[in-house]
Amino acid sequence: MPTTVVALASAAVVVVLWLVVSFLPRSVRRTSIEWLATSALFLALGAWFIGLSLEARAEGRIWLLVPFGFLAVVFSSGLCVSTWRTCAHLLGRGGGGESPTH
């Protein structure tokens, strides 16, 4: 399933980026990497729950659509916000040293 591939690839990106963040001193570059890792984390979680929702629907387990669908919407919304904030930070409009981890 494509959502599984996206979720696993995003999870791998999160692991690599957070290892990089762990060894970098505080800087603008580290904050940029943190924002990218945050977006990748939301992508992984959103893709995972979208896949679970589609699987539950295909198997006829309608009662699972509510929790999986809710979480898919929450994490997809988080992806939109974190991607917007990542772009703003990379373009220099991040405003006042905001960090995705505070």
Image (cartoon, grey):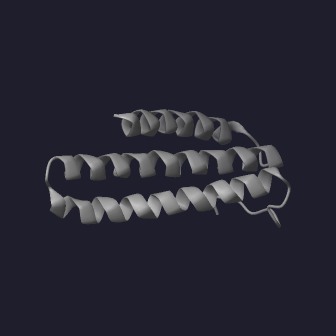
| Residue drawn where x is 44% and y is 52% of the image | 46
Most extreme residue toward the right is 92
Quarter of the image where one finds residue 24: top right
- The answer to which of 58 and 67 lies nearer the viewer is 58
In this rendering, position of residue 7 left or right of residue 1: right
Image position, residue 101 (x, y; %): 63, 58
Count of numbered labels shown in the rendering: 0
| Residue drawn where x is 53% and y is 36% of the image | 15
Image position, residue 63 (x, y; %): 16, 63
Instruction: Point out the image quarter for the C terminus.
Output: bottom right
In this rendering, position of residue 93 left or right of residue 41: right
Residue 1 in view in this figure: yes
Residue 53 against residue 81 in the figure, above or below: above
Most extreme residue toward the left is 60
Instruction: Point out the image quarter for the N terminus.
Output: top left
Residue 27 in view in this figure: no
Residue 25 against residue 102 in the figure, above or below: above
Image position, residue 90 (x, y; %): 79, 50
| Residue drawn where x is 24% and y is 46% of the image | 55
Image position, residue 53 (x, y; %): 29, 53
- The answer to which of 89 and 99 lies nearer the viewer is 89
Residue 70 against residue 51 in the figure, above or below: below
- The answer to which of 62 and 74 lies nearer the viewer is 62
Quarter of the image where one finds residue 65: bottom left
| Residue drawn where x is 61% and y is 45% of the image | 37
